[in-house]
Amino acid sequence: LRADLANVIDMRVLVPRVLSALEDSRRITHASIYLADPDGSGFELTGHVGPRPEAHFDAITNRAFFERLRRVGVVSLEGVEREVAARRTTTEELESLQLMLRVLEQMNGSVVLGFSGEEQLLGMLVLRDERLREAYSTDEIELFRLVATTIGVTLQNSQVYERMKERDRLAALGQMAAGLAHEIRKPLGSIK
């Protein structure tokens, strides 16, 4: 999958390709990809496999979850449940962990992998295999993390490519305007 994604630059192609490959692997029953809104106010569902998860997550309301995901890179249901069971947390930390459990439930996920760029969370890959309680080993999570990193790189390249296309379009528009001005000015000079 990572080798296949090396040649993709459009997110409209990437998301279905990733979800299809994950589904073909038979290691997931649920998967979804969320991307950050352009204004950074939240995360929007861009594709999923399995039951439809929540379509939008507000960045402010779920700040603790997204901040941890940005910092650590992976949030797992089992890890959060272990922290809750440890009971060495303050009331505030316990509320934060319970919020994380609710977010994971709304996402239909047991493992969430973030992809970041320039200290900013760009999106996340959400995975779940409901057939097993702790479905993914550390090695598998690391492989998924590499896929998420590849998605992040592709997303950044896609944004750069879109800016380049816009710049080229504006340059062509400027050249056309200059040529049009010359074509109008030339006959006006003769008439004058």
Image (spheres, helix red, strand yellow):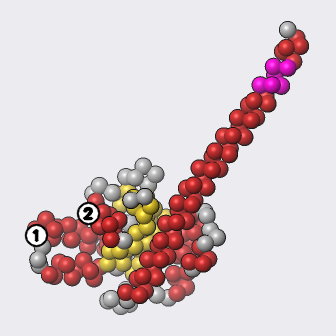
Q: Is residue 131 above or below residue 150?
A: below
**From the image, which quarter does the N terminus lie in?**
bottom right
Q: Earlier in the sequence, mark 1 or mark 2?
A: 2
Residue range corresponding to the magenta coloring = 181-186
User: Does any portion of residue 64 appear in the rendered image?
Assistant: yes
Is 40 displayed left or right of 78 in the figure?
right
- Tell me which corner region of the image, top left, top right, bottom left or bottom right, holds residue 45: bottom left
Q: Quadrant of residue 112?
A: bottom left
- Judging depth in this view, the residue of 3 and 50 nearest the camera is 3
Magenta stretch: includes residue 95: no
Q: Nearer the viewer, residue 168 or 99?
A: 168
Q: Is residue 36 above or below residue 142?
A: above
Residue 178 % position (x, y):
75, 30
The question of residue 184 being in magenta is answered with yes
- For mark 1, what is the residue? 90
> What amino acid type should be assigned to the residue bearing mark 1?
Thr
**Residue pointed to by mark 2:** 64
Single out the residue that lies furthest toward the bottom: 132
| Residue 52 can be seen, yes or no | no
Please provide percent x and percent y for residue 118.
43, 58
State the separation of the CA atoms marked 1 and 2: 15 Å
The quadrant in which residue 61 appears is bottom left
Left or right of 154: which side holds 187? Answer: right
The kind of residue tagged 2 is Ala
Residue at (56% x, 71% y) in the render: 16
Q: Which structural element holds mark 2? A: helix
What secondary structure do most residues of the magenta stretch adopt?
A: helix
